[in-house]
Image (cartoon, helix red, strand yellow):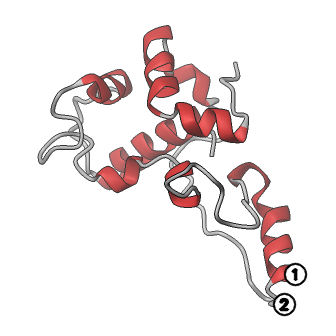
Amino acid sequence: MNPWDRMVSFYLYRKKRGNLPDEVSFRDYILQFNSPRYKRAKSLHSLPFYYYGLAEYILDKNDKIIVDFVGKYESRETDIKTISQRLDCPSLGHLCLQKAKPLEMHYSQFYDEETKNIVGRVFAQDIELFGYRFES
C-alpha cells in the first residue's frame, strides 16, 4: 500500500479502535517518527511490526526479492485472482477492509510538507521498490 495512504489509514483505524488518545493529531502521530522514543514502549509507534516497510517482508539480507509474486493493495482484486490461479485455489476469496477512512477523503489532505517528507524518509525503500509517489 502506498506508504502515505497507509499511515493515514492506520492512524484513522487506531483512532476508531480507541488506541490513540483523542488529542493526538495526525501531524503529531507522524512527527513521532522523529522522536528518540520511536518504537519504544509507550510511544505512539510502540508496536514496530505495524510500521515495518513492506520490503522487509519480501527481501533477503542482500535486498533480493524472495517471492515470485508481489500483490499490491491498489490492485488487490486482480492480484487475489492471480494468486488463486497460481495456487489452484479458485475460492481463495477477498480481503476484508476496515474502511476507517471516509471514502471521499484523499490521503493527501492529511499531510503538510514536513509530514509528507517524514513518511517518505521512513518508507523510502518501499517507495523506490514499488514505485510509489505522493499524489495530490
| Quadrant of the frame with the C terminus | top right
Can residue 29 be seen from the camera position used here? yes
Give the label on residue 85, or none.
1
Q: Taking 124 as reference, is 59 above or below it? A: below
> Which quadrant of the figure has residue 45?
top left
Towards the viewer: 116 or 94: 116
Position of residue 18 measured from the top left corner of the image (x, y, whole percent) = 27, 51
Give the label on residue 88, or none.
2
> Which quadrant of the figure has residue 126?
top right
Position of residue 40 measured from the top left corner of the image (x, y, whole percent) = 16, 44
Q: Secondary structure at mark 2?
A: loop
Residue at screen point 50% across, 49% down? 100
Can residue 54 be seen from the camera position used here? no
Say which amino acid is labelled 2.
Asp
Position of residue 34 measured from the top left corner of the image (x, y, whole percent) = 28, 23
Q: Taking 89 as reference, is 17 above or below it? A: above
Q: How many marks?
A: 2
Give the CA separation, mark 2 to mark 1: 5 Å
- Of all residues, the one furthest to the top in this rendering is 113
Q: Secondary structure at mark 1?
A: helix
